[in-house]
Amino acid sequence: MASIVIDGLVKTYHDARGNQTRVLDGIDLTIEGEQFVSIVGPSGSGKSTLLNIVAGIEPHSGGSVALRGDDPAGPKAHVGYVFQDPRLLPWRTVMQNLGFVQRERSGWEARARHYLDLVGLAHVGDRYPSQLSGGQQQRIGIARAFAVEPDVLLMDEPFSHLDAMTSRNLREHLERIWLESRRTVMFVTHDVTEAVQLSDRIVVLAPGGRIHETIEVDLPRPRRASDPDVALMQAEVLARFETLEAAAA
Ligand SMILES: Nc1ncnc2c1ncn2[C@@H]1O[C@H](COP(=O)(O)OP(=O)(O)O)[C@@H](O)[C@H]1O
Ligand SMILES: [Mg+2]
């Protein structure tokens, strides 16, 4: 399984007048294979920028990012990405949407059905995205990302457009699919309670793009928001995070 090794990462944007803004300021972070790590931080602290650099969508200004497989001489780690909105192709059925992205043609149908089943949507394969709710569409987006079987999965606030009940339901689906098919996951969210429920580790970014603190979440899985241990840790981490947000405001 692939690990993500980020070393002294710096990102600077230049505006039209030549002014520089540093949005990531020396990020050191290693995510081991099959770990689920969340990045939380106030709005503008550089979470999406960090994820986009790891995805290779955005260039960086200094330091390094390496995606390493088990075999350093082997093929490059394959990266999957789940966006805020599911970005399904409206003119294709659910199954066609899942088939379209497959790297490996052989057996794709069985694989697609397997992951659809894991998000509880085995019965909608022949429907079009417009025939599904927003929450169902995002579940399809998650099934699609897993069905490609990437080494590394990057998610940028995938549930933030959904109402509270739907997003709670989706977390459970995401945890289930991840427990069944472990991937190295980097998950960006501004929702601390979500991070506690899903992650092995939470990395808190402070404004200015530095790591404020790293929190290990050593709770048994599967986790439910109703578990007392989960609720307690959510409250603790939320209190710490609110202090950081207040300082940033
Ligand atoms: N293309 C860009 N050009 C200039 N500044 C940018 C650009 N993209 C993001 N930024 C700035 O970088 C900072 C971090 O943005 P972002 O990574 O989107 O934060 P987050 O995802 O934590 O809300 C913000 O201050 C934002 O305005
Ligand atoms: Mg963002």
Image (spheres, rainbow, N blue to C red):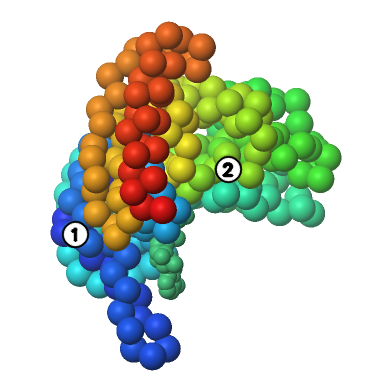
Q: Which residue is mark 1?
A: 26
Residue located 57% across and 49% down the image: 84
Furthest residue to the top?
228
Mark with earlier residue (2, 1): 1
Q: Residues within 10 Å of mark 2 (few under 14, many from 20)?
A: some
Instruction: Using the rendered image of the protein, determine whether residue 214 is visible from the camera's viewpoint.
Output: yes
Residue 185 at x, y = what percent?
Answer: 37, 39
Q: Nearer the viewer, residue 158 or 45?
A: 45
In the displayed structure, 16 sits above or below 182; it is below
Residue located 24% across and 37% down the image: 214
Specify whether tag 2 is near ligand 2 (CB below 8 Å). no
Q: Which mark is residue 160?
A: 2
Q: CA distance from mark 2 to mark 1?
A: 27 Å
In the displayed structure, 130 sits above or below 176; it is below
**Which of the 4 image quarters holds residue 60?**
bottom left
Residue 96 at x, y = what percent?
Answer: 70, 46
Q: Name the quadrant of the N terminus.
A: top left
Q: Residues within 10 Å of mark 1 (few under 14, many from 20)?
A: some
